[in-house]
Amino acid sequence: MQAGKPILYSYFRSSCSWRVRIALALKSIDYETIPVNLIKDQGQQFSEEFQALNPMKQVPTLKIDGITISQSLAIIEFLEETRPTPRLLPKDPKKRAQVRMISDTIASGIQPLQNLSVLKQVGQENQLAWAQKVIHTGFDALEQILRSTAGKYCVGDEVSMADLCLVPQVANAERFKVDLTPYPTISRINKTLLALEAFQVSHPCRQPDTPPELRA
Amino acid sequence: MKQVPTLKIDGITISQSLAIIEFLEETRPTPRLLPKDPKKRAQVRMISDTIASGIQPLQNLSVLKQVGQENQLAWAQKVIHTGFDALEQILRSTAGKYCVGDEVSMADLCLVPQVANAERFKVDLTPYPTISRINKTLLALEAFQVSHPCRQPDTPPELRA
């Protein structure tokens, strides 16, 4: 068993890394950040060293309890199972299914289609339109889903893994200039969540690798 | 999301295949689809997510429609190669008989259908001996056979087993 703090390989602006940063903050888990710059040096995620840690060559990756885990939701579910308080998944299996459904809608249905490596492949002149289309399609569905699951937050009135996925995806939407007017439920929940400390300390503008011009 | 699968069960409607599988696991826990140990559970979920977030969505029908017909095959092959390069490496440290150790898990449920996709897109599987071995072992199991695309109610006659 490794001594020392967990280590998170993260990029300040990576929405998937942000999800995990929020989880670590909510569970008051102290950790060290090793920044992986996805743009500099032609992408530090492609280094041999990082590839050995995560063969998918993506962030986030977390070293914790002697193991190395990649994939943000796999990391969050591990944190939930080993540090169960405060909860990030409700007790009731039906509500847990809703949390996972919303999380997967974002983590499989939206984000991968507009991440850096896909955008590189669609070509620079198409990138904005592609990202906007992907996000609109996903948010059209999400807005509808949330209208039946949401209370104060995505599922009822407790913060869950779904909320950890929502906020970073809304930030991506804003970065791609997606008009959020059609999504009042998404916007309301996003605003409520951003007021919470865990969502603030984990914010892209407050990370060790945040460039000075973007720092809060 | 206008996608399949969707399951109506116990009075609710769930979409997203992994959310469905985790619900089934929590409400019908035998036989297990996730190991007991949290570290092995993390490996199962990591492999499942690598496929369900990192490969499949990038080569699904709606994305392929958008890349244009002349580009589709090359796009799908690239996406699958990139993902399988990573998966082969991951599996070399997690796999026993199956993706994680010697028990069938959610990761195996993701692997077999993705290999079928790879074959459909004519991806050369020679660089992926671990993936191929596990896939072959799983296809021999009854659950993987009765659920096969060639044995479904909507399987077209010319593709029926």
Image (cartoon, coloured by chain):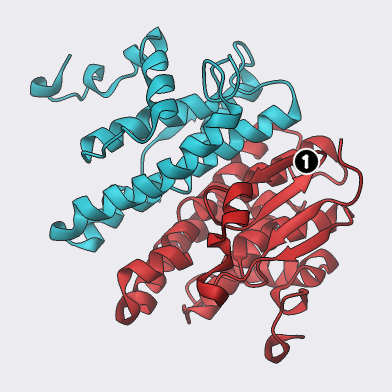
Chain colours: A red, B cyan
Whether residue A148 sits left or right of residue B3 in the image: it is: right
Residue closest to the eye, B125 or A95 = B125
Q: Residues within 10 Å of mark 1 (few under 14, many from 20)?
A: some
- Residue B137: where, in percent of width, then height? 41, 14
Relative height, residue B79 to residue B138 (above, below): below
| Percent coordinates x, y for residue B23 in the rendering | 59, 29
Instruction: Identify the residue at image location x=88%, y=52%.
Output: A5
Res B16 seen here: no
Front position in the image: A25 or B97 = B97
Q: Position of residue B6 (x, y in %)?
A: 42, 35
The residue located at (52%, 50%) in the rendering is: A56
Q: Is residue A193 above or below residue B125?
A: below
Q: In front here: A213 or A38?
A: A38
Kindly give the residue lying farthest to the front in the view shown.
Answer: A48
- Residue ID for mark 1: A80
Residue B160 occupies quadrant: top left
